[in-house]
Image (cartoon, grey):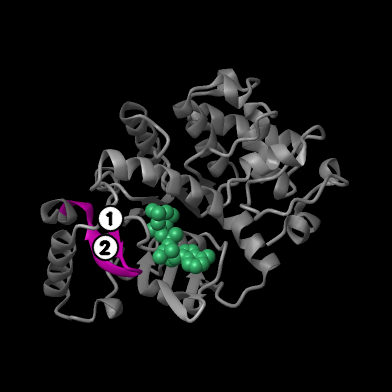
Amino acid sequence: MSLKDFKNKNINEKTQGTETLEVEDLSVSDESTDDLSSEDNADHLNNDSNADSENASEKTETEEDEPDEYAENHDEIAKLKAAQEAASGSSELGNVVFIPKEHIGELPLLELHDIYKIYKMGSEEVHANDGISVNIYKGEFVAIVGKSGSGKSTLMNIIGALDVPTSGKYLISGQDTSSMKDDELAAIRNKKIGFVFQQYNLLPKDNLLDNVCLPLLYAGVPKAEQNERAMKQLERVGLADKWMQKPAQLSGGQQQRVSIARALAGDPELILADEPTGALDSKTSKQVLGFLKEINEDGNTVVMITHDNSIALEAKRIIRISDGKVVYDGTAEDYAKLI
Ligand SMILES: Nc1ncnc2c1ncn2[C@@H]1O[C@H](COP(=O)(O)OP(=O)(O)OP(=O)(O)O)[C@@H](O)[C@H]1O
Ligand SMILES: [Mg+2]
């Protein structure tokens, strides 16, 4: 989707007249200052195809160095499937929807009903998501884990209202997004979802405060209130004293904390983090995961996409996908026993 319609709806006077970008909008992305070139934006607007091409190059390196990291472990998958089937009493995993016991009786925040995303490649069809049914409740911390090509990004794009399924229904707080048009999806993203990306996607020429203000700028919040709310979030991630610095002056972990602050600024119903520790060393990853846990403990719903079991285990609940299907959906505790 081009940013045009989205901008027409959301941008205030300050940004009117700036260039329209031919890249996918990711809700928190766009120029907020007058001096940004479209190149800068294209750089930070890390849409999914960029992310995937980065992953692809990482993959090549990984395959050379550690051949198994991205390969599916079929024994593990078989064990997870068998455990799920035994727990549910059904061999039709697609029809089984896990409900954490503390959320029984609640209405889900996110409802995925039999989601298929099918790509046509010439005469072949790729079932990137192949009948996924999942409910996610307010206040959960869920990791969606799967190896390369399992369908994580495809699912994240649907959950993040960046794309719609080929068939099936996806509801966010009861609102069905499956047949929404681009501008309606953009409005949902803007209001309900805060994104955290592997590469942070901060605007390089803006200071931290302006970066965190972005979702509020889109929401049409007056500037003084934007600053006040953004500063609160910077305080929350321990970076308020650096508000006037530029992203490049920070470490990777600090930049990711700024991006978490930005995701939180608009007070969204869902924080959607795509490989949030993918670019960080293990010590910094732990800190960033600590922040995600903390914001979850404060009541935020967090969904995190990762290919790494050890990262996924930091969440409360794990959904494992393989070949576009759910092969495990349950507590992290139970998952740990099975892998
Ligand atoms: N736009 C597309 N056109 C055709 N096939 C696609 C498209 N996007 C994804 N696929 C295919 O769908 C499947 C799932 O892809 P997806 O990007 O969701 O996997 P992933 O789990 O995110 O992988 P990775 O960890 O490598 O990012 C793959 O087989 C992929 O090749
Ligand atoms: Mg991906």
Element assignment for label 2: loop
Label 2 or label 1, whichever lies nearer to me, is 1
Q: In the rendered structure, find residue 226 and report the number of the disc placed on it.
A: none
Label 2 packing within 10 angstroms: few (<14), some (14-19), many (20+): some
Which residue type does callout 1 highlight? Answer: Arg
- Residue position for label 1: 317
Taken as a whole, is the magenta stretch helix, strand or loop?
strand
| Residues rendered magenta in the picture | 317-333
- Measured as percent of width and height from the top left, residue 27 is found at 63, 52
Coordinates of residue 116 in the picture (x, y in percent)? 43, 76
Image quarter for residue 104? bottom left
Q: Please tell me in which quarter of the rendered image ligand 2 is found.
A: bottom left
Q: Nearer the viewer, residue 120 or 238?
A: 120
Image height of 15 relative to 25, above or below: above
Q: Amino acid at mark 2?
A: Pro
Disc 2, disc 1: CB below 8 Å? yes
**In-image side of 241 versus 112 (left or right):** right
Q: Is residue 75 above or below residue 213?
A: below
Q: Seen in the image, is 164 located left or right of residue 152?
A: right
In this view, the residue in front, 330 or 51, is 51
Residue drawn at x 23%, y 81% as measured from the top left: 92
Q: CA distance from mark 2 to mark 1?
A: 8 Å
The answer to if 177 sits in the magenta stretch is no
Name which of mark 2 and mark 1 comes first in the sequence: 2
Counting the numbered discs, the total is 2
Residue in the picture at 42% in, 35% down: 279
Q: Judge whether residue 322 is colored magenta.
A: yes
Residue ID for mark 2: 100
Q: Quadrant of the N terminus?
A: bottom right
